[in-house]
Amino acid sequence: MSVMAAMTDKQGLNDLLAAHFVPASLEELVVKRRDFPHWMRPDLQKALAALFGGDGEHRLVGARMRGVDLDFCFADLLQDGATGIALAPVLYDDIEIGEEKPVRCVRRGLWLASRCGIRFALLIDVSEGYRHVRARVEVAVFPEDANEAFAAQLLCELRAAAESAESWRGKTLVIEPPQEEFALSAAGPRVERFEAVRRDDLILRADTLALIERNTIRFAERADALAALGLSPKKGVLLYGPPGTGKTLVVRWLCSALDGYSKLIVTAGHYGLLEETLSIARLLQPALVVLEDVDLVGGDRDGPWAGPGRILNMLLNEMDGLPREARLMFVLTTNRPEVLEPALAARPGRVDQAIEIGLPEEAERRLLVERYAGRVAIRGEVAAHVARRIGRVSPAFIKELMRRAAQAMLERDGEVIEVRDAEAALHDMIGAGLGIGARVLGAGSGIGFTAAVLE
């Protein structure tokens, strides 16, 4: 009868382990351990599946913890079956990676296996603590040099597979915080899905769009060649301008257009996870790191808008301390460039190019009027009139204006937007509030809104 067959009659994990390693005593085993960040679990699981999916004798069992003082580790498995850890079904977690099916990952399990004449046991346990979740892998072998070298090599191979991060590579990610204050779920990546944005979807001044493209897409295409010349392939770009001018749309275009790059987006509610985000970005490079509304943490340290000092210092150190060969691109956005810390915004090597995304000129406004009319018909001369009439306003203002113009058209049972529809919408948006409504909606004298409109 084989060792594996003999184990089927055993009930305690201690007994299974002893039968697997007979005639050696469990106290003689050598155990090697490695911890993995929670977000590496999908790729760690794939590596384990490959390890135990081929030829070779192996068995996977689960565990039921009999006491709160026990951990699932080989040290606790040395306790006998009456008081120790009991046999149970294997516990799994389904982890979403933005694909058709999640990755089914073992949460607590023990493999008893043999490879190349070496008997070994491998256990995995995922444990949670305050703001810390990790997957721990332990490998136990007989105390012989060849066996110990095998265990060490096995852990190195698992680490390399986990750090390859193939489950996340090339995707757009947001690092989500734990969901509960107690009994935490792990912070980790969430795949962000949004409709792809094309270059033609951006209605910006031609010189502005060309400058953005040259400092992002074209730079990325030549990053390897620059590195071969001994020059840094790292890049930092600041996009600034009034609210609603299209900075976020530019970011989405970059996420769509940067082939081969992983993208990590940090928004206002996620700066507390900046350290985790940058750690993941380093492994996923080439990577694009987007820091939206960076003024929330990057305010001038000597000014009234100073952000959290720890986060700002971390950001400065990370951007400055990356290896010269790092393939990371940072894109920062802000509505308030004047409040930014000079060491962040005015220092090449951190931010190499600042680009203003300003209010559209008349030619761009006409294109925006036509685009935001959607499937509603609007004649060219009406679009041109509206573009002149509204003055320098944000694209967000124009989008809302055209929706209201379409509503006005429907209220008179029309089929084509006319000047009167746009005028009625414009009056609703800015007239009743004596200019306050205009400023709230992305227009106003403070940002260049024409006096004629505010009359």
Image (tube, rainbow, N blue to C red):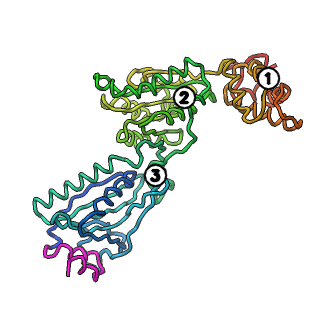
Outermost right residue? 412
Q: Which residues are magenta?
A: 1-24
Residue assigned mark 2: 334
In the displayed structure, 35 sits above or below 310; it is: below
Residue type at numbered disc 3: Ile
Name the residue: 55% across, 24% down: 240
Mark found first going from the N terminus, 1 or 2 = 2
Classed neighbour count for the residue bearing mark 2: other residues with Cα under 10 Å, few (<14), some (14–19), many (≥20) = many
**x and y, in percent, of residue 195 in the image:** 58, 41
Q: How many marks?
A: 3
Does dot 3 land on a helix, a strand or a loop? loop
Q: Residue 440 falls in which quadrant of the image? A: top right
Q: Mark 3 and mark 1 in contact (Cβ < 8 Å)?
A: no
Which residue appears at 89% of the width and 36% of the height?
412
Nearer the camera: disc 1 or disc 3: 1
Q: Amino acid at mark 2?
A: Thr
- The residue indicated by pointer 1 is 382
The numbered mark at residue 265 is none
Gap in Å between the C-alphas at discs 1 and 2?
34 Å
